Image (cartoon, rainbow, N blue to C red):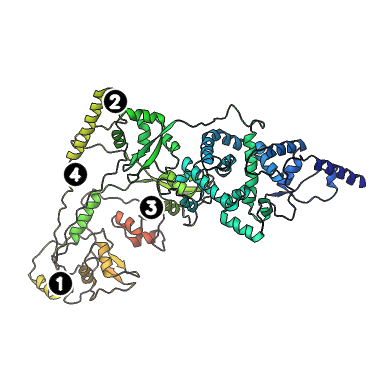
Amino acid sequence: MRKAWGRLGVVLLLAAGVHPAAAQVQPALTPAQPADTARVLLQLPPDSLVAEPPVEAVDSARLVWLQTPPELKDLVGDRVNCFETDVPHVFNGTVMSFVNYFTVRNRAYTQRILERQNLYFPLFEKYLAKYHLPQDLKYLAVVESALLPTARSRAGAVGLWQFMGPTAGDLKLVRNEYIDERMNPEKSTEAACKYLRDLYRQFGDWELVLAAYNWGGGHLSRAMKRTGQRNFWALYPSLPKETRNYVPTFTALLYTMQYANEHQLHSDQLHYLYPEPTDTLIISGRSLDLRKFSAQFGLDSSAILKQNPEIRKTYLPATIRNYALTVPRCVSVEMAALDRNTVLDFCQVAPPPPPPIAPVAPALDGTDSTRTLLAAAEQTVADKPDKPKLRRVRHTVRRGETVAAVAERYEVTPAQIRRWNELPRSRQTLTPRQQLVVFLPVEKPEAAPTGAVVAKPRIPARLPLPADKTIVAAAAAESGTLETATAAEPAPKPEPVAAKAVVATPKSSKAVREMAAVAGPAVAPAPDDSLPATYLVRRGDYLTKIARERGLLVSQIMAWNKLTSETVVPGQKLVFTAPTETEPGTLALVPAAPAPKARRPAAPEPVGPALTLPKTHLVQPGDTLYNISRRYQGVTVDQLRKLNNLKSDEVKPGQKLVIVQS
């Protein structure tokens, strides 16, 4: 036992002597301090010198430090100590664990960063020099976003420098439905340099500046006031886990990228990115379809969006003012050969045609315009095109995706995504591999015209280059012909609605009796099955509302139900058909003498072939039981509720409802 402990003492003395004398070595954290990574159990062979005393759980950073050869620790410590920078860099076990992660365990991640560093580092260095900041701060964007301008964290931070919404507002970065300048590399970099300059003026220490950039200046100031410490490593136990690892990660990434060749991270198989020559195009007061603009110059559909990652949609609205659009240099060369206004007018967003105005039948005093209104409504519904059919699409959530990102991908609203998948309003992030349902419209092929149609001029896919004046003149003539044809084409007139026979509605029972005595024989109108025959009054209903929803008059409902006032109570049953015991051609409001109730006569059988109802109906978004019952003639809400065992009128998209009982 004594020999074993003696050998252990020799090993510990040798291990203590391998640290370089010149390097800044941070003392190991005591076990009483909170661990910042997962704790694992060190399994040692029984014959090991340190296996004699019981070994407790060892921090993973400490484990990497123990497993690292002394020569490698000396080499990394010497290199870190030789950094010529204004930012102090301390070498310890935590830094060594992150160096091991970036150079050994996750080399692919580091190589992806090396592919993009030549694209963004010159831009970072330009603005760091403009604001007199250390050049090493360019590696801060690597820690934040891995040099991805569209990176988005779960907390809502966006861009190369991961700005939150309030911070971006303080730094005058524009954020709206179409533009988010947090993803603009140049503007976000200048804003980050201003923010780092202000933090250094507040704390005066670059390690504290890095911690404040991650945790927030207010949180760090309160921690310093609470502990009385003004050094990062003295505040280390009081910081959250992410902030404790932030400064060691920054040092490890700086070392890894400066000594990437020594760790064989560069390779001929990597696709290195470099800045391309670009130009700017000012867009103001007109819309611009970016996909049409890219096709005009023979570019990829996503080429313009890659140059302008801050654009959130595939177009710019007409309300935008003085926006500098970054375009490749080849675009400016071709724009010089074309007329600028002609190109921008050609690439404008095509607005959808306005919907036709439905005719409204006039309501005349003293007449029953119910039938006329119903006829006008039927004609309007017949004139309207069918609702677009929707197809069900399943989407598998990727890591880091949010509800807004999925909605933007499928060009729908976040509210629709939440409603289709029953997601709570407060939930913004999604679980990876979660299955979401999205409903997209099915594009129908256009039907061939049946009548004689004037051939419209074809719109060219792209404007021709003015190599020959005749080509440009032909294109201008074709464009002028299109405008003339569009202006001369008359708007389609709605077909007149055939007015049906209406029956006069007297306002008093005396007038009814006089009218019944004078009126001659007439043909009774056929009962209308498009409306339910009865209705059960619910809480909050009143007679005017019920009449307006069904296209009836209040006096009609009062007459058919023998009401003396417009007051209705919940649970009261209302009838929407005229009594059948009156004389043909008359409409009784208040009968002269009570008569026994007669059953409603059956609807006359149709003359043409009988229409068979489908057995089931697939509920679409926006459907209700009332709308579904109106869609199938002879089907009421009560029937649907009984056939499908429904306790309420709520239905969900994708639900199957039984229409006809088999």
Q: CA distance from mark 3 to mark 1?
A: 43 Å
- Say which label, 2 or 4, has the lower sequence index: 2
The residue pinned by badge 1 equals 507
Residue 621's tag is 3
Cα distance between the residues tagged 2 and 4: 36 Å
**Residue at screen point 32% across, 44% down:** 318
Q: CA distance from mark 1 to mark 4?
A: 43 Å
- Please, what secondary structure does the residue beneath circle 3 have? loop
In the displayed image of the protein, which residue is found farthest to the right?
2
Q: Residue at x 52, y 35 (%)?
A: 122
Task: Estimate the x, y position of residue 151 in percent, counting from the top left.
Answer: 51, 43
Q: Which residue is mark 4?
A: 491
Write down the residue under mark 2. Answer: 466
Give coordinates of residue 100: x percent, y percent.
68, 39
Where residue 223 appears, x then y in whole percent? 63, 58
Q: Secondary structure at mark 4?
A: loop
Badge 4 or badge 3: first in the primary sequence? 4
Q: Is residue 388 left or right of residue 166?
A: left
Residue type at mark 4 is: Ala
Q: Residues within 10 Å of mark 2 (few under 14, many from 20)?
A: some
